[in-house]
Image (cartoon, rainbow, N blue to C red):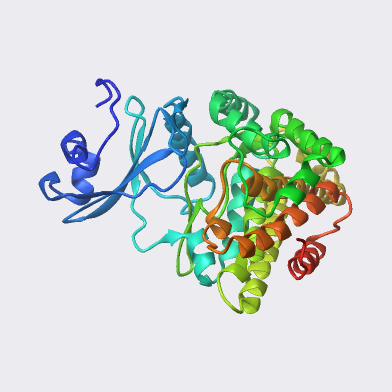
Amino acid sequence: MEERPYEALTVETLARRLGDLPALRDRIGDPAGWRVREVGDGNLNLVFIVEGDRGGLVVKQALPYVRLVGESWPLPLRRSFFEYHALRRQQARDPGSVPDVLHFDEGQALVVMEYLDGHIILRRALIAGTRHAGLGERLGLFCARTLFRGSDLHLPAAERKADLALFAGNVDLCAITEALVFTEPYFAAPMNRHTPGLDPIAAELRADAALKLAAQRLKTAFAARAETLLHGDLHTGSVMVRGDQVRIIDPEFAVYGPMGFDIGMLIANFLMAHCAQPGHGRDRADYQAWILSVIRAIWTSFAAEFARLWRTERTGMLFPRTLFEDQGQSWAADAACSGWLGQVWRDTLGFAGLECHRRILGLAHNADFESIADEGLRAACEAKALVLGRTLLLGQDDIAGIDALIDLARDIAERDWL
């Protein structure tokens, strides 16, 4: 297939075009018996589930445009190249955290990977009110392991610089992040939209100079602080769950940036799920408390695992052991770790605030709010998240730790902001 011109797959053509690939035939059997369905509900790509006599797999293919918008917004196919390489690195750095990759075809911009049978998108589980044991702990471990092991704290300098150069080519998806997350929510961009009833609060946020300055400082950090390889789009729609099993998907926005970006995006989506719960049932107070416990577990698990890796796997060029532990100054290395985590925490708060704003005022919304049919109720839930986002963005230096964040989220969600 790599020698053929690019052609988007369809349910009807997939078996014919991919049926000769040993990786697929060996996994699921004779293509004559394949059952194919297209299930992509994201903003960018085609996603097919292919099932045969021996099992199933997933085929994900990039389209030459943004699927959410259409052909008027062209997008390079090479994003599948970055997704493939990100998946390989995430699998190596946190084994079992992502689907196994079975085949990659750069010319056709497609990745064939493990079918996570029985798993569902985490966002849907949160809307349904389903609990998953160990969820926060597992997500925190993923963040700590992938972010630490992809940085100059761990990687040999040459390997890390080669990776930085490789992922620096993911220019077009970076441009989407730079526009949709950091800039467009704060003015009347042409593709923005928001729920009727939010006009006053949207106007207030867009007139807030301090807020916009904070957003641009974080945009500067995203562009300039290449600390580690990020997933780049880590939210509850990029996580699949089944019982206590957790897998991370869709790292096509992978790029080098500040560690707090991934964690902030992830925590923000749980905060929005918390704010949205009144729109999904009469009494979700217990479930809201569970969501907050997951947020706490994400951060505490991340911080504990990061500190463990700092002590045991700090083999890169930063904070070398020859300067500290080897000279009997472990206390200084521990202090440096605490300082590093303090900066990650402040970044996490700011990036979380941005995510709350862009998912409500920008182009790409999420189902936590969009699935609330009553517009008045939806606006009331979204207003809570907008206020929380502003508080996080402007309070990066004032929210002392995870307990303070949980208390803040609970307080804001209990009040009416319209």
Residue at 67%, 74% (x, y): give it: 289
Q: Quadrant of the N terminus?
A: top left
The C terminus is located in which quarter? bottom right
Q: Is residue 171 left or right of residue 392?
A: left
Q: Residue 227: percent from the left, percent from the top?
A: 69, 35
Left or right: residue 347 versus residue 293 is right
The percent position of residue 12, horizontal first and vertical second, equals 18, 41
Q: How many marks?
A: 0
365 left or right, relative to 114: right
Q: Nearer the viewer, residue 200 or 383?
A: 200
Q: Does 285 sit above or below residue 370?
A: below
Percent of width and height locating residue 204: 80, 46
- Choose between 338 and 32: the one closer to the eye: 32
Give the camera-side residue of 383 and 288. 383
- Asked if one can make out residue 348 in the rendered structure from this viewpoint, the answer is no
Q: Is residue 298 visible?
A: yes
Q: Residue at x 55, y 31 (%)?
A: 173
Q: For this rendering, which residue is in front, 402 or 273?
A: 273
Q: Position of residue 121 (x, y in %)?
A: 46, 58
